[in-house]
Amino acid sequence: MTQSHSSSSLEEHPVVVSRKESEGFDYTENEAQQVHTLAPEQEKAGDSDFKVITSRDADVTLKFLEENDHLVEPITPEEERKLSRKVMWIVVSLTALINLILYADKAVMSYAAIFTFFEDTGLTQNKYNNANTLFYFGYIVGQGNLYFLQKFPLSRVMFVMTSFWTIIIFLHCAAYNYQGVYTLRFFLGFVESIGVPSLNTTMGQFLTPQEKSATAPVFYAACMGVTIPVGFIAYGVLNITNSSIPTWKIFSIIIGCCTFLLSILILIVYPSNPTDAKFLSKKEKIWVIRRVQQSTGSSIEQKTFKPYQAKEALKDPISWIFGAFFLLQQLANNLTYQQNLLFEDLGNITALDSTLVSVASGGFAVVMAVIASTFLMYKKNFIAFSVVIWSIPSFVGSIGAASLPWHNSIGLLAFVCLACPVFGIPWILMFSWNAQTCSGYTKKLTRNAIIMFWFGVSNIISPQLWQERDAPRYIPAWVVQIVLSFFLAPSLALVIWFILRRRNKERLAKLESSSQQVGLIEENGEKFKVNVALLDLTDLENEAFIYPL
């Protein structure tokens, strides 16, 4: 499987791959997330059959490693524990904060619905659904923005994106009819479309697969728990009784200010990759790059679009099974926005009460996310089964919400709260697992585009399940969620687990009896060993890539 790329510059050095005997590496099924490759090391290379690419097609960290890697000693176990804690605290906290504000922006209209937003803009239940649908039309169109992730520094893309978020949230205050609301929601979806993929990319640049899987629920707890801070903000705004400004506009202004402050924070500290992380020393940067590349066998960042990797992503059946999961599971996503309206329909629950109930619901989701993260921190290769387990509360809650007598308002309230927030845990586990199960930067971006496309399609459909004619029980919507979102979708996680486990068995058998991939850089007739991850190979190209399960 040989592929060559012509050099576009005299300064680009060929990068080649050879097969060497593995030395002392013990591959076991329980350590399937580990990919052992030789560390960067200068050494003469013998003649062999090489796969040749140019440095333009290699990882962006290559130059930084050439200049600094030989100056940094190997990390000790104690230093690695400290580095792991530091990186997880900073990176997960930063990305989770951005995720929280992103979902606060997205939920502005949901909370505005408990003010006088509907009356002031002429919205009805069906027009509200249409506005949410248009948000995801913008989301699908906005997947083209993934191009900017590969062409420009990630930190700058994030800053521009959050700046536009800020402007659009402030413009919500100017809406006076439903047509204006439609326009704003479309463009908000367009701008936010690559928000989660960008944050996911950043976590993949700094965290090992085990750390990324374990912290994924904590990351998503930020958006599941968005009802806590936003609920309290809404509760405070609802208590304003003597303002000449409509309370929903005050609410939008507060959320817009939070987004503005977030943009400033991103401009100051957000990293494009480990080489420019201001919170790491030069030694720590080298250590982060080494441990991520050695544990994933994958590149950290690559700025050249590779068409063959995009084609591979489209041909890989795993891409489409992940896409099918998001198509089915996200049919339930409008439940998040419908929640406050459902609370009001139950009777005897005021707008003030509904904000407090949403706070409690978000708190429950955060606690469950922490439990899920703690479990995955110590239990390896259990992602697919976790997806199934954490779909059960939503499955049970939906059945209860659809079948309990309408007069049992407390029971219905409890089941709605059980069904709504926790299905976010399987969603983020699958989103994180999707990124971990493919290698090659262009392939990752293409895979992200595939799943986000189906995510958008599902969320276009999802609001339309909640039609006014089905109120107040909305039985058709609950049935779709029970069968497709909370039963069939998690079953697909087991299908992916079965396919990847079979691939791992084949690869581990070859690795035990044959050789280990290493990369070589050729410069002035000298060849230097590098970690194979620097070559930005796909998971199907690199037979040493072991899929995390």
Image: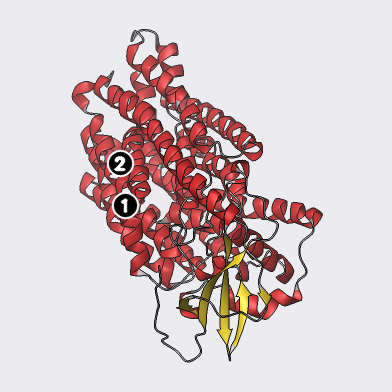
Residue beneath disc 2: 459
Q: Can residue 538 be seen here?
A: yes
In-image side of 117 versus 241 (left or right): left
Task: Give above or below for 141 relative to 469.
Answer: below
Q: Residue at x 48, y 46 (%)?
A: 433
Which amino acid type is marked by label 1? Tyr
- Helix, strand or loop at disc 1? helix
Q: Can residue 240 be seen here?
A: no
Q: Give coordinates of residue 416: x percent, y percent.
A: 41, 22
Residue beneath disc 1: 139
Which amino acid type is marked by label 2? Asn
Q: Give coordinates of residue 380: x percent, y percent.
A: 61, 39
Dot 1: within a 10 Å radius of its alpha carbon, few (fewer than 14), some, or many (20 or more) residues? many
Q: Give coordinates of residue 337: x percent, y percent.
A: 37, 35
Q: Residue at x 45, y 54 (%)?
A: 438
Indicate the quadrant containing the N terminus: top left, top right, bottom left or bottom right: bottom left
Q: Which mark is residue 254?
A: none
Colour style of the rendered protein structure: secondary structure
* N-terminal-most mark, 2 or 1: 1
- Helix, strand or loop at disc 2? helix
Asked if labels 1 and 2 touch by Cβ distance under 8 angstroms, the answer is yes
Q: Quadrant of residue 241?
A: top left
Q: Nearer the viewer, residue 229 or 334?
A: 334
Task: Give above or below for 280 relative to 182.
Answer: below
Q: Nearer the viewer, residue 101 or 109?
A: 101
Q: Residue at x 55, y 48 (%)?
A: 96
Q: Residue at x 45, y 64 (%)?
A: 441
Dot 2: within a 10 Å radius of its alpha carbon, few (fewer than 14), some, or many (20 or more) residues? many
Task: Give above or below for 87 relative to 9.
Answer: above
Q: Quadrant of residue 205?
A: bottom right
